[in-house]
Image: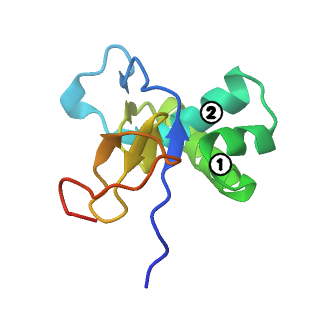
């Protein structure tokens, strides 16, 4: 049996979700996808200047998981900048603060983890 799905907590969705080099037409660009949880990890660590254990606590993940997220995010950012690729922010295992995700169908719904578990309206779990 697989491990239960545990979303990474994100405070809010990024305002901008696509970046590209100027002067290069879209059809000629390769794309690098940065997930929303990777953006949140970068924001907490590099913008808010929090320690890794505090970032991990806010995102509801282990510190080792946060480290892997940061390494992946920084590698993708560097690749996009150095090789002139478009950067798209999309997807990933996340839940916005105040939302829950069904462990079976992974649909987002309002309410937090501490509230009483209710059946998912989509799959009944």
Residue 62 placement: quadrant: bottom right
Q: Is residue 65 above or below residue 29?
A: below
Q: Residue at x 79, y 44 (%)?
A: 53
Please tell me whether residue 20 is drawn above or below residue 124 in the rendered image: above
Quickly name the residue at label 2: 42
Q: Residue furthest top?
A: 23
What secondary structure is marked by label 1?
helix
- In the image, is 61 to the left or to the right of 4? right
Q: Nearer the viewer, residue 100 or 35?
A: 100
Image coloring type: rainbow
Q: Nearer the viewer, residue 19 or 9?
A: 9
First in sequence: mark 2 or mark 1? 2
Which is more foreground, mark 2 or mark 1? 2
Q: Can residue 34 be seen in this view?
A: no
- Classify mark 2: helix, strand or loop: helix
The residue tagged 1 is 71
What whole-number distance in Å separates the C-alpha atoms at marks 2 and 1? 10 Å
Residue 57 image point, x, y percent? 70, 44
Q: Is residue 106 visible?
A: yes
Q: What residue do we see at 65% from left, 56% from top?
A: 65
| Image quarter hosting the N terminus | bottom left
């Amino acid at each position: 049996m697989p491990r239960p799905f545990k979303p990474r907590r994100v405070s809010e969705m990024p305002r901008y979700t696509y970046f590209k080099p100027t002067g290069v037409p879209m059809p000629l660009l390769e794309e690098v996808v940065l997930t929303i949880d990777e953006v949140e990890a970068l924001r907490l660590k590099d913008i808010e200047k929090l320690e890794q254990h505090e970032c991990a606590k806010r995102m509801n993940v282990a510190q080792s998981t946060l480290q892997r997220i940061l390494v992946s995010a920084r590698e993708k950012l560097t690749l996009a900048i150095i090789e002139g690729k478009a950067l798209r922010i999309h997807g990933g295992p996340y839940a916005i603060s105040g939302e829950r995700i069904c462990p079976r169908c992974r649909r987002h719904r309002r309410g937090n983890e501490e509230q009483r578990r209710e059946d998912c309206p989509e799959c009944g779990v």
